[in-house]
Image (cartoon, helix red, strand yellow):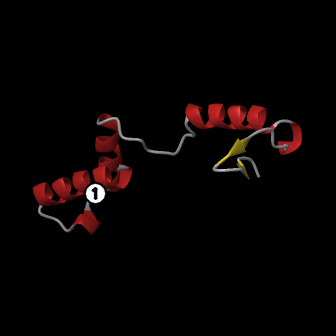
Amino acid sequence: MIVGQAAGVAAKMAVAAGLPVQEIDTRALAAALRRQGAVMEYAPSPQQRLFRLFRREWCGPGGKFYGIANGGTPACP
């Protein structure tokens, strides 16, 4: 989704300026994306952190398995 937004904005800028997309001003592209609230860098989701906490509690200390999932196979490696 991030790449698609950047590609669309870059294409619009190129058409408006009458330039090939490779020649648009990348600083202006980044500024336009920031104004739109685009994600410009990866930030881990807080949900991933919660999932790791849950997994640690479910698997127990040292990753030891304490439950059965998927028809009898261990849920934690």
Crowding at label 1, few (<14), some or many (≥20) Cα neighbours within 10 Å?
A: some
Q: Position of residue 23 (x, y in %)?
A: 26, 65
Q: Position of residue 3 (x, y in %)?
A: 36, 55
**Amino acid residing under circle 1:** Ala
Local secondary structure at mark 1: helix
- Locate residue 18: give its quadrant: bottom left
Tally of marks: 1
Residue at the spot 77% in from the left edge and 52% down from the top edge: 77
Above or below 39: residue 9: below
Q: Position of residue 36 (x, y in %)?
A: 29, 36
Residue at the spot 77% in from the left edge and 31% down from the top edge: 57
* 62 left or right of 20 in image: right
Query: Which residue reaches farthest front?
Result: 71
Decide which of 40, 26 is in the foreground and name it: 40
Decide which of 21, 25 is in the foreground and name it: 21
Residue at the spot 23% in from the left edge and 54% down from the top edge: 8
Residue at the spot 30% in from the left edge and 48% down from the top edge: 28
Q: Position of residue 54 (x, y in %)?
A: 69, 32
Residue beneath disc 1: 7
- Locate residue 34: give its quadrant: top left
- Locate residue 43: give its quadrant: top right
